[in-house]
Amino acid sequence: MADPYIRWMIRRDMAAVLRIESRSFEFPWNDDDFVAALRRRNCIGMVAEHENRIVGHMIYDLEPNRLRLLNIAVCPDHRRTGIGSQLVQRLVSKLSIMRRDSLAFEVRESNVGASCSSGRSAFESFRLSATTTPTRTRTPTRS
């Protein structure tokens, strides 16, 4: 499969994003969740397009010293093709030693397998969060 084109999310992408979201999670974000997140000043949405079709998306926050991935999903028909990795790699490429030097995200305990698919991930640390819902926060290594 050719690499997807990764671009800024626009309003007309929302129907495809919501379809992917509902097929991907037990408790998916709805339209209001996406709109509320994207209205925040430091929140950015991106989509992955393949053959003029949205096949993945991510939402992240620009925090003072790091990027925080809030939501990422890939269309079930396009999983295991590297799209999720390419979306995350796009974030990693935005890291800078002088400014934002880490990427944080939380993964439900039931979805850790997806985040570590085939052991190919380039993340160096796990931390179990002290919240009521166990989550994992991961920090990428820079090569």
Image (tube, rainbow, N blue to C red):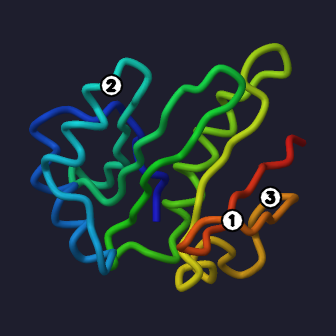
Left or right: residue 113 versus residue 83 is right
Amino acid type at circle 3 is: Phe
Mark 2 vs 1, N-terminal side: 2
Q: Nearer the viewer, residue 113 or 6?
A: 113
Disc 2 to disc 1: CB gap under 8 Å: no
Q: Residues within 10 Å of mark 3 (few under 14, many from 20)?
A: some
Within 10 Å of the Cα at label 2, are there few (<14), some (14-19), or many (20+) other Cα atoms?
A: few
Sequence order check, earlier mark of 1 and 3: 3
Q: Residue at x 32, y 54 (%)?
A: 50
What residue appears at the point 85 percent right and 48 percent down from the top-left corner? 141
- On the rendered structure, is 100 left or right of 5? right
**Which of the two discs, 2 and 1, sits closer to the camera?**
1
Q: CA gap, disc 2 to disc 3?
A: 28 Å
Point out the frontmost of discs 2 and 3. Answer: 2
Q: Are marks 2 and 3 in contact (CB under 8 Å)?
A: no
Image spot of residue 95 (x, y percent): 72, 29
Residue corresponding to mark 3: 123
Q: Secondary structure at mark 3?
A: strand
Residue type indicated by callout 1? Ala
Q: Residue furthest top?
A: 98
Residue ID for mark 1: 130
* Marking on residue 40: 2
Q: Position of residue 115 (x, y in %)?
A: 62, 71
Q: On the rendered structure, is 50 left or right of 70? A: left
Q: Is residue 11 above or below residue 78?
A: above
Q: Where's residue 30, x and y in %?
A: 17, 57
Q: Earlier in the sequence, mark 2 or mark 3?
A: 2
29 over 64 or under it: above or below: below
73 vs 11: above or below:
below
Residue at the image point whose x is 24% and y is 44% from the top: 34
Does residue 31 appear to the left or right of 7 in the view shown?
left
